[in-house]
Amino acid sequence: MHRIGITGGIGSGKTTVSDYFKSLYSIPIIDADEISKQLIEPNGDAYDDVINLLGPDIILNTGELDRKLIRSKIFQTPTLRTSLEQIIHPKVKDAISEKTNNITASYCIIVIPLLIESNMQSTVDRILLIQTDKKLQISRVSVRDKCTHDHVEAIMNTQLSTTEKLIYADDIIVNNGSKESLISQIEQLHKKYLALST
């Protein structure tokens, strides 16, 4: 079974692409962000470690962790972000490995937004980069997250640029145009991945 890793900048359309692979071809999807969220839930494997790192003020009245405050803390202090990644990333890798071992499909999609930045290339067989115009990314995220363009650009500046990611990409989807264009590209890649898996 081939493991296809989807990555791309914020607002590039990673979820949209993976959703189409699932809805059109019933391809199994593993989402690293979802795994990360589960890890910091009250019974999650990383819950206590994250509190010890970032402090008890990140605990909400419900017992859940305040993800918005976590993002704010690690955004302001890069060393905290690195320490948090050292807690989360190995556990995400282990969870991905366990999930892929139980898949019987020809290939699966693993969505890892920071696949290259977090040096998780070994978890996939191919890297599919979702490439999007920067202005479009900023527009999408500012509407989706109800934040300023400056805030989105600040987040983008913490990630590798598309040009830097292109060096690692095996396949590319350009997500600047219509739904039809996107689906056409996905269809071609689906055929390619089926051929590779056989």
Image (cartoon, grey):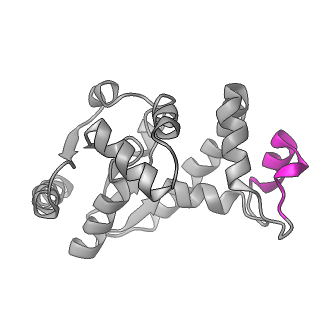
Left or right, residue 170 beside residue 161: left
Left or right, residue 67 beside residue 9: right
Residue found 71% across the figure and 28% down from its top:
77
Residue 151 falls within the magenta-colored stretch = no
Total marks in image: 0
Is residue 185 depicted above or below 169 in this figure?
below
Quadrant hosting residue 183 = bottom left
Image coordinates of residue 24 in percent, x first then y, are 21, 73
Is residue 62 depicted above or below 161 in this figure?
below
Residue found 26% across the figure and 42% down from its top:
132
Quadrant hosting residue 9 = top left
Farthest residue to the right: give it: 56
Image coordinates of residue 44 in percent, x first then y, are 74, 62
Residue found 45% across the figure and 68% down from its top:
102
Prevailing secondary structure of the magenta residues: helix
Left or right, residue 150 beside residue 25: right
Where the C terminus falls, by quadrant? bottom left
Image coordinates of residue 148 in percent, x first then y, are 50, 43
Q: Which residues are magenta?
A: 46-60
Residue 52 falls within the magenta-colored stretch = yes
Is residue 25 depicted above or below 185 in this figure?
below
Q: Nearer the viewer, residue 33 or 9?
A: 9
